Amino acid sequence: MLKDGIILKGNKDGLNVVIDMNKFENFDDMMEDFVQRLTLGKKFYRDASIKITTQLNEFNEKQIIMLKNILFDEFLIKDCIFEEIEEIKNKTFLGVYEGRTKFYRKTLRSGQVIRYPGNIVIIGDVNPGSEVYAGGNIIVLGNLKGNVHAGNSGNTKAIISAFRLQPKILQIANVMTRAPEDDEKPYYPEVAKIKDGTIIVEPYLPNKFV
């Protein structure tokens, strides 16, 4: 694990950058730090090549284009390539409580997709049309109405929990279920988990996650 969110290293071939998105709240937070660091050595980067190693599933196409435009237009970078961080991409989560956890302090709107190889905690709502994929657990401190897939690396012990659990599609590992039409949901937190090969939903009770 990196001590810093961004590490810059220059060599004869150009500039190598390692970005650990676990260290940032969001893309904008990372970009602010990245631009600030590049600005300190701006005169050295003209016509240089840059390789960025990061968790590519944390970026959408629009964000990658934005990042490239800043590098090309503001810092006159010659070319830019992206590479996946193998250590994080290959990490497998084997238990309910194990692994890294990513916090998203925002509501997900329709069309937004977030992915993380560990646990995801969303402080806000997950609106219809949004999607959440986690290698571990998914916890929503709000209404969950989008599509969610916990344990997407094959972790059958993963759980999905929300203040109001109303997903259109809910999947844990390779087991999927759809919300019934016109299903009246209770006004208390619930937990979804796999039991005997099927997904069951129970009221949240302290010390009863497994």
Image (cartoon, rainbow, N blue to C red):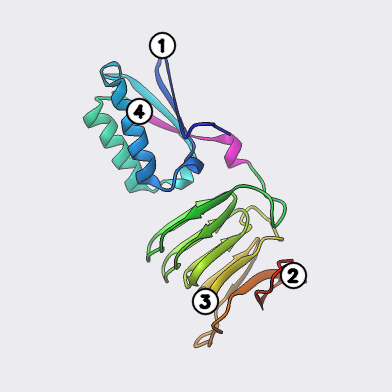
Q: Amino acid at mark 1?
A: Lys
Residue 128 in which image quadrant: bottom left
Q: Which residue is mark 2?
A: 197
Q: Position of residue 72 (x, y in %)?
A: 26, 30
Helix, strand or loop at label 4? It is: helix
Identify which residue, 24 or 12, lies in the foreground.
24
Q: Position of residue 31 (x, y in %)?
A: 35, 39
Q: Amino acid at mark 2?
A: Gly
Which region shows up in magenta? 81-90
Q: Is residue 87 magenta?
A: yes
Q: Quadrant of the N terminus?
A: top right
Mark 1 vs mark 3: give the one in front.
Answer: 3
Q: Residue at x 44, y 57 (%)?
A: 105
Question: In the image as oriented, which residue stretches furthest toward the right?
Answer: 196
Q: Which residue is mark 1?
A: 12
Disc 2 + disc 3, Cβ < 8 Å: no
Residue 207 in which image quadrant: bottom right
Q: Which residue is mark 4?
A: 37
C-alpha gap between disc 2 and disc 1: 55 Å
Q: Which residue is mark 3?
A: 166
Q: Residue at x 58, y 35 (%)?
A: 86
Q: Position of residue 199 (x, y in %)?
A: 67, 72
Q: Amino acid at mark 3?
A: Gln
Please tell me whether residue 122 is drawn above or below residue 191 in the rendered image: above
